[in-house]
Amino acid sequence: MSRRSGGGGRNRLLVQGAENAVEQMKYEIAAEFGIQLGAEQVSRANGSVGGEITKRLVATAQSQLAGAFGQPTGPSRG
């Protein structure tokens, strides 16, 4: 298991080798949002990038799972 930073079980990447892809995704999303990442930014701006990373990773995983089980992809119901 790969560990990025922080403690207490947070900020862990569960797939080895994913660090570079997630780091690239972070900067691509920040550019899309017009955010310059860094400690000088408000946490809300930096956090919006992290939230979008999570949404995109979940959507990717859902698409892969749906494809593996022959399910159509789309918004979840319920």
Image: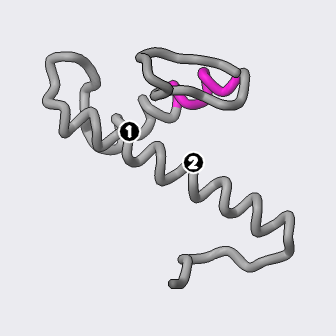
Image disc number at residue 57: 2
Mark 2 and mark 1 lie on one chain; the one further toward the N terminus is 1
Image disc number at residue 6: none
Q: Give me the residue at 37% from left, 46% from top.
A: 51
Q: Is residue 27 left or right of residue 45?
A: right
Q: Secondary structure at mark 1?
A: helix
> What distance separates the C-alpha of mark 2 from that of mark 1?
11 Å
Q: Give me the residue at 27% from left, 33% from top.
A: 46
> What residue is pinned by disc 1?
50
Q: Give me the residue at 46% from left, 28% from top.
A: 10
Mark 1: few/some/many CA within 10 Å (<14, 14-19, 20+):
some
Q: Give me the residue at 51% from left, 25% from top.
A: 23
Most frequent secondary structure within the magenta stretch: helix
Mark 2: few/some/many CA within 10 Å (<14, 14-19, 20+):
some
Q: Quadrant of residue 69?
A: bottom right
Residue 42: image location, x then y, percent: 14, 30
Q: Quadrant of residue 76?
A: bottom right
Q: Secondary structure at mark 2?
A: helix
Q: Amino acid at mark 2?
A: Leu
Residue 72: image location, x then y, percent: 73, 79
Q: Quadrant of residue 1?
A: top right
What stretch of residues is rendered in magenta?
17-24
Q: Residue furthest bottom?
A: 78
Q: How many marks?
A: 2
Residue 34: image location, x then y, percent: 25, 38
Depth order, front residue of 61/28: 61
Q: Amino acid at mark 1?
A: Gly
Depth order, front residue of 70/3: 3
